[in-house]
Amino acid sequence: MINLKDYRENPQKYIDWANNKWVVIDRKMFSDADTNVRDLQTKIDALKAKRNEFSKTVGEITDKWSNEFRQLVEQVQGLKIEIANLEKDYDKEHTVFSSLLKQIPNPALDDVRIWKTDDENYIIEEIWTKPVFDFDPKPHWELLEEKGLLDQERAVKISWSRFQIIRGQFAQLQFALMTRVTNKLVSKWFNLTLVPQLVKEDALFATWFLPNDSTNLYRVNPKVEGLEQSEWEEDDLWLIWTSEVPLIAQHANEVFDENQLPLRYVWFSSCYRREAWTYWKDTKWLIRLHQFDKVEMVSFVNPKDSAKEHELLREIEEEIFTELGIPFLRLWIVTWDLWAPAAKKYDLEAWFPWIEKHKEVTSTSNTTDFQTRRANIKVSINWAKEFAHSLNWTAVALWRALAAIVENYQNKDWDILVPDVLKPFLEFEKF
């Protein structure tokens, strides 16, 4: 959620930045809705004050049969009806206002580049030397299927396309990578926290995924309007898009003490996405799946520290992939490709030898106070309360990282070598 007071004082700033994020704000419609909501609230508050004043006077009249008493009671009743009618009008106007407000994205920070296509994301640095093969490398899914470690056909049988079954040593490699990364982050003062993967609507609203991206979410046992249901049939929960959702929402409506921050969490979980409108892309890859696993981090910080925290998270991301020995690019994401809650975002793109291209494997975003404002998460600083800043980052999207390992560590005998950093967690060095 944006700072509404700041928007009212500087509307053009938000309109321009929204345009840079491919969002169009109807300034007149929003301004009219804002004015109507405030005017109606002012009228309601004035009538309530008048009603309370009359009610107090009514209570002080001893002669309950007098004309004065009867007239005041009638006035109080009339005010109640008038207030009720205005509140109905307010609810209608506020629905319009709230809907428009939720569509306004978080303005990008001043150092983020303004571009109109995601092809212009700014490559900061290429890290690690690309492997040189004296043979034609195979795609990861082909190598894994030949070894019986990836089974897309049976996954479709039990679920649908874009689901996968992984087996044997490849599954063991996933747990090794998960354990290595999680242990690393715990050693860096991240709090390992296991939270639910089914969440209420409020949690997804707090992190922006609702109502904006509902078509890409899986809803479980939704309530049906007008249909009586037993208590255990009315859970109406949503599968998480990312671990960020419960890690942020767990602190909704809380106030941190300044000394509690930074507060950092790490969590391993499955994530669920419908991937609407991408049915033709990467159908064989372990990239765009409906269910996948990752290690996710969230930080809550003092607002003055969020830029510094963002750089720290980026450095840890790069450290993880450098230790894995996977060549990657660091990208500074431009406004056109910057998702609505993010004020600044870095991506890492790993090298995939088979297609001779880099593909995104992880990212880190500074969302400033956009999510904490929606979730009402504050910090007390010198006896004053202000919204904390939150940041999120994927330490490792496991199947994407594993796909990169398979492609970069294959040899001419079609064995897949295990990166040195993962060998202590396994009883084999190739498979």
Image (tube, rainbow, N blue to C red):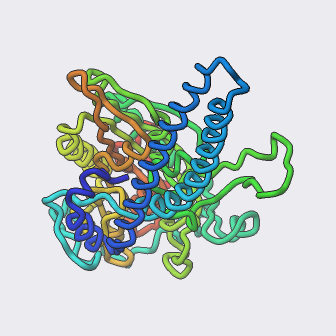
> Relative to 405, is 60 above or below?
above
* In this view, 138 is above or below 230: below
Q: Quadrant of residue 381?
A: top left
Q: Residue at x 34, y 73 (%)?
A: 28
Query: Extreme bottom residue here?
Result: 280
Q: Position of residue 114 (x, y in %)?
A: 18, 71
Q: Nearer the viewer, residue 376 or 159?
A: 376
Residue 279 image-quadrant placement = bottom right
Question: From this viewpoint, is residue 107 visible?
Answer: yes
Question: Dividing the picture into quarters, in which one does residue 336 lie?
Answer: bottom left
Where residue 172 sits: x, y (%)?
Answer: 54, 46
**Where does the image place residue 312, in percent across and percent down from the top left?**
22, 42
For residue 232, side relative to residue 287 (left or right):
right
Left or right: where 145 falls relative to 135: right
Residue at left 38%, top 60%?
A: 34
Q: Nearer the viewer, residue 275 or 137?
A: 275
Who is closer to the viewer here, 407 or 274?
274
